[in-house]
Image (tube, rainbow, N blue to C red):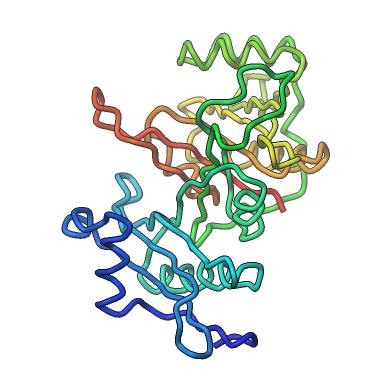
Amino acid sequence: MNNRGYKVLPANPKQLEGIAAFCKLNEKKKQENVIIFIAEDACGTPVGRIVIIERSIPSPLNGKRWYVYDLFVSSAHRRKGIATALVLKTMEEAEKACVIFIYGSANASVEASYFWLKQGFSMNAYGRKQDDPAMPLFYGNYFHMFSHCIRRKPLLDRQRNDSVKALSNEKTQRLIDEYMTDSEKKVYYMSKGDTLSGFAICGKHGEIMGAIIAFPDSMQAPLESIRLFVDVFVMEEYRKKGVGRELICEVCHFAKEIGAIQLTNFSQTAEYIGFWYEIGFDVFFWDVNPNTGEYSTTAMLRIE
């Protein structure tokens, strides 16, 4: 029980069945493991809940992830730390259960967006944006997805590596044209023009061992912050030698200098997700591509 007289505990069987029915989870409950934690006041009256659906994580990570299906606190008990207590309980129990990620999505309201950001989650907006940029943004027309790695692997905040060199905008665009194989992503990056930044690690003879491309973008309203979209290229003969990690470390320094609070990488498949996980990124798994059978993924890292 916290200092305000509230306690968080697992839902009893009756509460579990009732909430599962209310949230229309009865069919899902037969197929997936549903976990519910209840917040009660000093009299034992439920005042809030968090509903979790346990799902598997695909290869190469192979493990469990908890999807936040519902987080609710009664209106009379809001702004008293109950939602935070429910999330903290979920994170504690997730670690005991060897869960890798907690993730979910929420309407991009001011309250919901800043709540998840405050809990230390990384975030990304998706869905339909405002069609006319001159008009005020209607927060309800897209969502913020959020993710948090329970046992985050540390990205060593090393001193700047002298072998990592900043690239001119012209060289950065040349790298994109030469090494980015996804045609749609290539067009998207090239459209960023002068906002592109590039860094490379070169060998003794000037050959490129690896490079990273980045450009700043809004975290999307109501979050008044920016993030860096990043893509890493490491030549095959230099992979698994720390080149990618050094490039990410350099971009972390750069992000702090320009005031960005997050790095974000989009991937069409989970092929390289092991790399992002090993250097401490939160990962969001999208739906399975029906043509390839693979998950689309987004990797994100908060810059403290």
Quadrant of the image containing the C terminus: bottom right
Q: Find the residue positioned furthest to the right.
A: 257
Residue 55 lies, in percent from the top left, at: 30, 54
Q: Is residue 88 above or below residue 178?
A: below
Q: Is residue 232 left or right of residue 205?
A: left
Question: Could you say where residue 160 lies in the image, as x and y percent from the top left?
Answer: 77, 43
Which quadrant of the figure has residue 100? bottom left
Could you say which is closer to the camera, residue 21 or residue 231? Answer: 21
- Residue 72 lies, with reference to residue 5, above or below; the image says above
Q: Residue at point 80% right, 41% down?
A: 259
Question: Residue 53 in the image: x percent, y percent?
Answer: 33, 58
Number of marks present in the image shown: 0
Residue 261 or 53: which is nearer the viewer?
Answer: 53
Which of the pair 17/32 is nearer the observer? Answer: 17
Res. 287 image quadrant: top left
Which residue is nearer to you in this view: 132 or 210? 132
Vertical placement of 250 versus 46: above or below? above
Instruction: Judge left or right: residue 225 versus residue 4.
Output: right
At x 56%, y 29%, the residue is 232
68 in relation to 90, above or below: above
Left or right relative to 226: residue 50: left
Q: Quadrant of the N terminus?
A: bottom right
Q: Position of residue 296 (x, y in %)?
A: 38, 33
- Residue at the extreme bottom of the image, as rendered: 43
What residue is at 71 percent from the left and 44 percent from the top?
261
